[in-house]
Image (cartoon, rainbow, N blue to C red):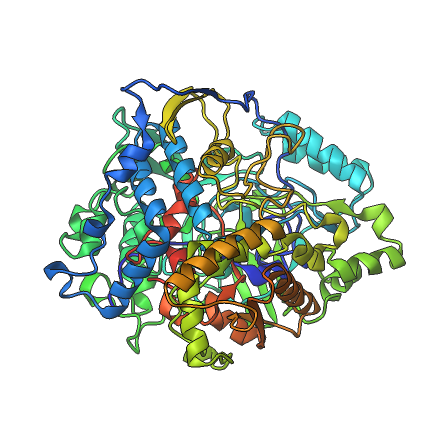
Amino acid sequence: MKNFLKVLCIVLAVSVLFGLAACNPSTPSNESSAPATESNDASADASQDESAAVSEDPGADLVDIDALAAAVNVDELLPTEGDDIADVDEYTINSREAYKAVLDEFYRYYQVALAENETNLRYVKMAVAEAKLMEACVMVPTTTQGGNYAIGRVAPYTVTNVMWGNDSDRFHQVLVSTELMKPEDRNEIKAKWGELKGTGEFEAWAKKFLADKGYTLKDTYSIGYSSDPQTWDALATSRAADSEAIVNTYDGLVEYNIEGILSPALAESWTISDDGLTYTFKIRSGAVWTDVQGRKVDDVKAQDWVDGIHHLLDAAGGLESLIAGKVAGVAKYLEGTGSFDDVGVKAPDASTLVITLEAPCSYFMTMLTYNIFAPMSRTFFESKGGKFGDEYDPKADTYLYGTSPENIAYCGPYLVANATEKNTIVFKANDSYWNKDNINIKTINWYFNDGSDALKAYNDMKAGVVDAAGLNASALEQAKIDGLYDEYHYLTGTNATSFMGFLNVNRARFTNIDAGAGNDSPKTDDQKEATKKAMLNEHFRRAFCMAFDRATYNAQSTGEELKYVALRNSYTPGTFAMLDKEVTVKLAGKEVTYPVGTYYGKIMQDQIDADGVKIKVWDPTADDGVGSSDGFDGWYNAANAAEEMAKAVEELKADGLDISAENPIYIDYCLYDASTRWLNQGNVLKKAIEEALGKAVIVNLNSVTQEQFYYAGYYTEYGNEANYDFYDLSGWGPDWGDPSTYLDTFLPEFDGYMAKCIGVY
C-alpha cells in the first residue's frame, strides 16, 4: 500500500470514558479521575458586530471565494484514470473516488484557503471551507472535553490551559491539596488568574491563598487512565495516549507556562529574522540526558533537535507531514528526492539551533510545543539499535528504542519508575533535571480504569487514590447521597478538543483487523452494498446526522442537567480564531464585510446559511454574548432529518436503490456494553435514528469488548481497516494556533490523519 504522509494527535475518546476538562493522561472524558483544568472564561477583548454589512453589487476587485474554488480542478489533482495513475494501487484509487464523491467542495475551498498568506483573509477562507466540511456530513460533532460536574483536589489554572500542543499534559507545576477543594475557593483562584496572567506572580499567589484557606499542598498527583502507551518514542507516534505519557519525560525548546505565556525551556532565548524564515535558538547549558535509572547519558545540545527531526521523518509515525512545506527541505526528503543535508534544521555549534522555513509562518512558534519538535539523544538512540535514513529499520531484532520506558533517554522533569500494562504507570522526579528545584510534583501516579465500573473514578477520588473525578450520572447521584455534591462540586470548563461521530463512506472491512479480531457485521452482502451506496449520498448523511439526538446521548454520561454544556457543533471551535483586521470578500454572490473582532464561527455559519443547510454551528448569544459553537444542539431536528431523508430516498431510487421501512439501510455501531454509559448511549442512538427516519434506517448495536472497540477504529492505520458504519471513539485536539491544525486532518492522499475515520486513505 502506498503510504503517503500522515498527520498527528488523535485524541482517544474512550477518553469520553475518563477525562475531564483538558487533554490529560486519563485520556479525555466525562468519567475521569483526571484533573478538571478550567478554560479561561474571560471575554474577548475585541468587540464583535454579529451582523456583517452586505450589499448585492460587489466590486470587481473583491476576493470571490466561490470563483477561486471553482477554478480548482480536483480531477487533475486526484486522478482516478489515465496514464498518471498506472503505479497507484486500487485502494488509493477507490479512496480518491469516494473522497471526491463526498468532500469535493471542501477540498476545493480548502485549497484556496491554504494558498492564502494574509492571516485574516486566510481565516475567512478556512471558515468557508469548514462550512463545506460540515455540510458534507461525513461526521457529526458530538462533544468537547469538560463541561461536566467534578470533585477534586487540584487547583484550577495550575496546568496550562493553552488550546494546542502537548503542554496541557505537563504536570510539574500543578498544585494538589490533601483536602477536597471548595468551589468558592476555585472561583477565587480563577478570578485572580485573570488578574495576574502574564505577570509571573500567579503560582506564588495561589500557594499562599491555598495555605491561608487551610489547604495542605502535597507533592504527589494521581489520576486515572484508560489506554497504555503503544510506544515511548515521542517522535514516532500520532496518538494522544502515547504522547500524554511521554511528554513528562522530556523538555522542548519552549513551553507555555501556567499563565499561558510562551516561555523558555531548553531554549534560553530565540530570534526571528526580518523575513520570517530563520529562527535561531540559544540552547540552555547544563541540561543533561539520563537513562531510566537517572544515570547521565549525554549533555543536551543543539544537535539533539537536528537528530530528532531526522528520526521524526524516518519513523513516519504520523507527525512528519506537519512540517512538510514549513521546514525547508522536509517535503523533498519525504518524497525521496532530497537529502537530509538539505533539511532546514542545523546546529552550527553545541548551543545554537537554526531552523529555516520554506515560507513565513505566522504560527510557527506555537508548533514548537508539540512533540514533532522533541529533542532526541543520538548517543542513546544508537545504543538501542537506532539508525538514520535508509538504514532505519524499526523491525530489526536489534532495534529497541522506544519499546519501553527503559529504552528512551530523559531530559525532562520525570523518569518512569513503573509501567505495568493495564494497571499503573508511575513518574518520579528526575534528580538531574535542569529545573528540578522549581517543580511542585515529585510523583505522578496513573491508575488504569477500563470504564466498566461507572463509580470507580468517583470512589477512587473519595478514597484519595486519585485526585479528581468527573461526575457521570451514577457518580452524581452517589455524591449527593454521600453529602459531597453540595459542598465540593464544580463545573469544569470546556477546551479545544473536538470529538466527532464518523460515517464510513467507503467501508471495506466487516470484521476487525487481526490484533483485535471479532466484531463481525451481521449484515448480508446485499445490505452491505446498500449501506455503502446510501453513505455516498449527501442527503442520506445529513438525515442521519440530523436524526442523532446528541444531547440525550450525552446525558447518559453527564446527567440531564448538563447534557448541552459540552456539546460541540463544529470541528474547529468557533472562538479558535478571530479577525484583527477588517475583511471584505464576495461570499455566496454577495459582498460581505467582517469587522475586527469577528469570530471564525460567525463566518462559518454565514456560509452554511447561504447554502441553505439547516445546521447551526455558531450562536452569537452564547457565553454571555461573546458567542460560541458549544452549549447547544444545532444539529438534531427530526423534521429536518425527515426532509433530508425524503431527498435521499428520491435520489437513491433514481439510482436503483429503494429505501423504506420494508427495505431499510442497516448501520453497524460498535457497542462496548460492559460500560453502562456506552450501553445507554447506544440505545439512545438507535432509538433516535430509527424514530426520526421512520425505520428506514436500522442501527445494529454490535456488542464488542473494550479491545475490539479500540481495534474497530482507533487503532487502525488506514481507512480500509475501519470496521463500522458509524463510530464515535475518536476526536482531535489542536497542535498549533491556526484552524489548519483541524482542517489538515481531512486532506486526501494519506495526508489527513482523520480521513481514515470515514473509510478513505
Picture layout, residue 174 above or below residue 531:
above
Relative to 354, 505 lies left or right:
right
**Count of labels shown?**
0
Picture layout, residue 561 above or below residue 278:
below
The quadrant of the image that shows the C terminus is: bottom left
**Percent x, y for residue 445?**
63, 61
**Percent x, y for residue 648?**
46, 57
User: Residue 490 appears in which quarter of the rendering?
Assistant: top right
Residue occupying the point 52% across, 64% down: 727
Relative to 359, 124 lies left or right:
right
Residue occupying the point 45% across, 46% down: 135
**Percent x, y for residue 678?**
65, 67
Which one is in front, 21 or 104? 104
Residue occupying the point 51% across, 64% down: 726
User: Residue 753 appears in which quarter of the rendering?
Assistant: bottom left
Which one is in front, 481 or 749? 749
**Percent x, y for residue 474?**
78, 62
- For the question of whether residue 637 can be seen, the reply is no
Picture layout, residue 192 above or below residue 731:
above
Which one is in front, 609 or 302? 609
Relative to 626, 718 lies left or right:
left
Which one is in front, 276 or 539? 539
The quadrant of the image that shows the N terminus is: bottom left
Residue lying at the far left of the rendered structure: 83
- For the question of whether residue 107 can be seen, the reply is yes
